[in-house]
Every structure is written in C-alpha cells, then in structure tokens.
Amino acid sequence: MSQEQWTAVDRYITDRLVAPDAVLEAALDASEKAGLPAINVAPNQGKLLMLLAQIHGARRILEVGTLGGYSTLWLARALPPGGRIVTLEAVPKHAEVARENFARAGLSDVVEVRVGPALETLPQLAKEGQAPFDLTFIDADKVNTAEYFAWALKLSRKGSVILTDNVVRKGGIIDGASTDANVQGMRRFYETVAAEPRVSATAVQTVGSKGHDGFSLALVTG
Ligand code: SAM
C-alpha cells in the first residue's frame, strides 16, 4: 500500500470513529497559523491516547514534547475532575501556542507547560516531589528518548504506564549501521527498555497519515 492509501484509510477511520471536535481543530489551526510543524499525532492516534489514559484511570499525566498541545488536549480529555497534566517543551514559541490552545479549551488550570530541555525539567520535577505520574507520553526529540524513558520510570509508580511514540522510524530501527541519529536514539531506547527488569513492554508498528512508524507501551511492574 502507498502513503496515499494509508492516509485515505486513516480518514475513513477518523470520519467514523473520531467525532469532529471544535477545540481540537482550533488547536491544530492555531498551530498551523503560528508556523508550527505538523508533527502532532493523528486524530485517531490522539483518541487512542485518550482511551488508554481512560482505561488506566490516569489522574496525573506527564508528557515529554508538547508542540502546540494537540496530544495534550487528547490526554486531558481522559482526566477525571481534579486530574492534572504536566507537559514539557523546549521551544518557547511552541509552549506559547500550546498555552493559548489550553486557555481556549478552558484547561489552563489542568495543564502545566514547563519550558526548557526535558533533560533539565525532568530532574526538576523529581526534585520537587511531583512524582508519581500514572501515565507518561514520550514524544519529543528522538535522540534522547532512552533518557526520557529512564526519567519517566523514576517518576512512575508500580502500575504506571509509559507510552513512547515514533519507535519504528519507517523500519529504520533494524539498521544497526544507520547514520540517522534518531534511529540510533530509538535503538538505545529499545536497549534501555529491554535491560529494565521493572517494566513489561511491547511495541507495535503503525501505518497511517503519519507514515510507517509505531509506538511502545510499557507497564511498570516493580
Ligand atoms: N506530542 C505532540 C503532539 O502530538 O501534539 C507533538 C510533539 S513534537 C513531535 C516534539 C516536540 O518536542 C516539539 O515541539 C519539540 O520542540 C519538542 N522538543 C524537542 N526537543 C526537546 C527537548 N530536548 N526537550 C523538550 N521538548 C523538546
């Protein structure tokens, strides 16, 4: 199948299973107008995030990689009253657009955006005693994904879930000689997860409007 067909199938699924949502669409529009790259999750993937968070009963969610806050808004939909999301973003302009999107959605009190490289903001969260988070979604720069996973684990409890996006890289992950830093970053992520006795994890390949990629799901077991 071609990218065109994958995109058409995503549209078919979304048209039937993902109801139009003015808040989410406004967030994507505002992100596009502000010139942010369209590297947010697809609508059907966003809904999967929401459903996983709902199934898990997550009350405290951590996100690494905000962009314009599209995936954050999906995750926020899963929260019960009193629930909270902390989302980490390195680029001030992305954080600013995301904050505007959260304000428009009436979620400024629910979502906290922390600006700075996640390798600085994650230790800060630990120092402040913000842990544990029930669910973490990792979707920032791919080079440091292994480190983000290690931090997510530190900020978790037994029973927490860690979701990681873009773990297949169009199949690039099977190429040990790849010169692509993102591929090598993801290979280090797999090595980190595989060597970690405190999680039970898997990964699933996906195709769709965002191409051939995949996501990983890890349950903290100890
Ligand atoms: N999760 C978002 C969504 O689906 O709507 C998309 C996130 S986008 C793929 C990745 C984001 O991570 C970008 O906004 C980028 O600026 C941010 N990022 C890149 N390097 C980062 C770092 N070192 N620390 C925190 N955020 C970073």
Image: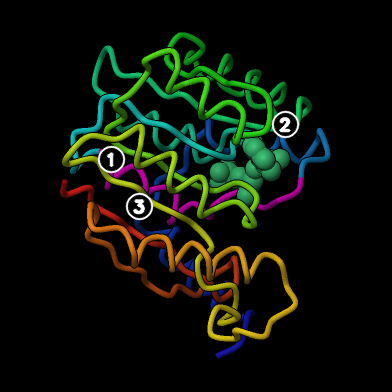
Residue 155 screen position, x and y as percent: 35, 32
| Ligand 1 rendered quadrant | top right
Q: Which mark is residue 53?
A: 1
Report the predominant secondary structure element of the magenta stretch: helix
The crowd level at tag 3 (other Cα within 10 Å; few <14, some 14-19, many 20+) is: some
Q: Residue at x 59, y 72 (%)?
A: 169
The secondary structure type at the circle numbered 1 is helix
N-terminal-most mark, 2 or 1: 1
- In the picture, measured across the screen, residue 193 lies left or right of residue 159, that is right
Q: Which mark is residue 111?
A: none
Q: Name which residue type carries label 2.
A: His
Check contact, mark 1 vs mark 3: CB within 8 A: no
Mark nearer the viewer, 3 or 2: 2
Amino acid on which the number 3 mark rests in the picture: Leu
Of the numbered discs 3 and 2, the one sitting upstream in the chain is: 3
Which residues are the magenta region?
37-53
Residue 47 at what x, y percent from top left?
A: 38, 48
Which element is circle 2 on? helix
Q: Is residue 222 above or below residue 199?
A: above
- Local packing at callout 1 (Cα closer than 10 Å; few below 14, some 14-19, many 20+) is many
Residue occupied by mark 2: 94
Disc 2 to disc 1, how far (Cα)?
Answer: 24 Å
Give the residue at the far top of this rendering. 109
